[in-house]
Image: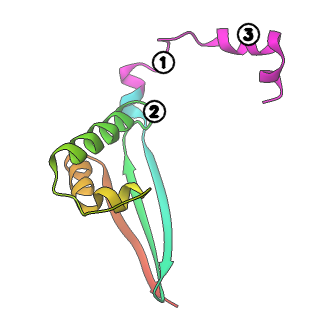
């Protein structure tokens, strides 16, 4: 971060990878992500996991596309104000993402 603040160092960093020099399709095919979420409330703690392929290109494109389709086509819950993606699209978006190959699973549920 410090180097990015110094113009010559910033220019060297920016020139290191040119626009369009991203990973190849073969490298993206080998990439994956897995993230865990922990939520608690109502006396319960739930750990879930979301996983999929290349998060930098392929899965991001899926997520954005499926969000747009869900907003345009799905019967969504009425909300108002600034809400989370889950509150805005919930089960409809989850189904779209699962159909697109992104997995969701409950890892653990415990009462406290």
Residue bounds of the magenta highlight: 1-27
Quadrant assignment, res 8: top right
Number of dots carrying numbers: 3
Q: Residue at x 49, y 63 (%)?
A: 37
Q: Earlier in the sequence, mark 3 or mark 1?
A: 3
The question of residue 6 being in magenta is answered with yes
Q: Residue at x 83, y 28 (%)?
A: 2
Residue 104 in the figure: left or right of residue 110: left
Q: Earlier in the sequence, mark 2 or mark 1?
A: 1
- Which residue is denoted by mark 2 in the rendering? 56
Residue 14 in the figure: left or right of residue 29: right
Q: Give yes or no for contact between labels 2 and 1 (Cβ–Cβ under 8 Å).
A: yes
Pick whichever, 17 or 96, lies toward us.
96
User: Which of the labelled discs sits on residue 22, or is there none?
Assistant: 1
Could you classify mark 1 by the number of other residues whose Cα lies within 10 Å: few (under 14), some (14-19), or many (20 or more)? Answer: few
The nearer-to-camera label among 3 and 2 is 3
Numbered disc 2: secondary structure: loop
Residue 72, percent from left and from top = 20, 43
- Which residue is denoted by mark 3 in the rendering? 11
Quadrant assignment, res 92: bottom left
Residue 74, percent from left and from top = 16, 52
The nearer-to-camera label among 3 and 1 is 3
Q: Is residue 64 above or below residue 85?
A: above
Q: How far apart, in angstroms, are the residues tagged by discs 3 and 1?
A: 18 Å
Numbered disc 3: secondary structure: helix
Q: How far apart, in angstroms, are the residues tagged by discs 2 and 1?
A: 10 Å
Numbered disc 1: secondary structure: loop
Q: Residue at x 48, y 89 (%)?
A: 43
Quarter of the picture holding the N terminus: top right
Q: Residue at x 34, y 38 (%)?
A: 64
Residue 82, percent from left and from top = 44, 56
- Residue extending furthest toward the front: 81
């Amino acid at each position: 971060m410090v180097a990015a603040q110094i113009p010559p160092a910033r220019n060297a960093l920016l020139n290191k990878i040119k626009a369009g020099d991203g990973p190849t399709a073969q490298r993206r095919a080998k990439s994956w992500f897995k993230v865990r979420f922990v939520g608690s409330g109502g006396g319960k703690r739930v750990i879930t996991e979301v996983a999929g392929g290349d998060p930098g290109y392929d899965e991001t494109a899926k997520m954005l596309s499926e969000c747009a389709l869900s907003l345009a086509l799905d019967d969504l819950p009425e909300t108002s104000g600034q809400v989370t993606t889950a509150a805005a699209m919930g089960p409809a978006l989850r189904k779209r993402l699962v159909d697109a190959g992104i997995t969701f699973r409950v890892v653990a549920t415990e009462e406290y």
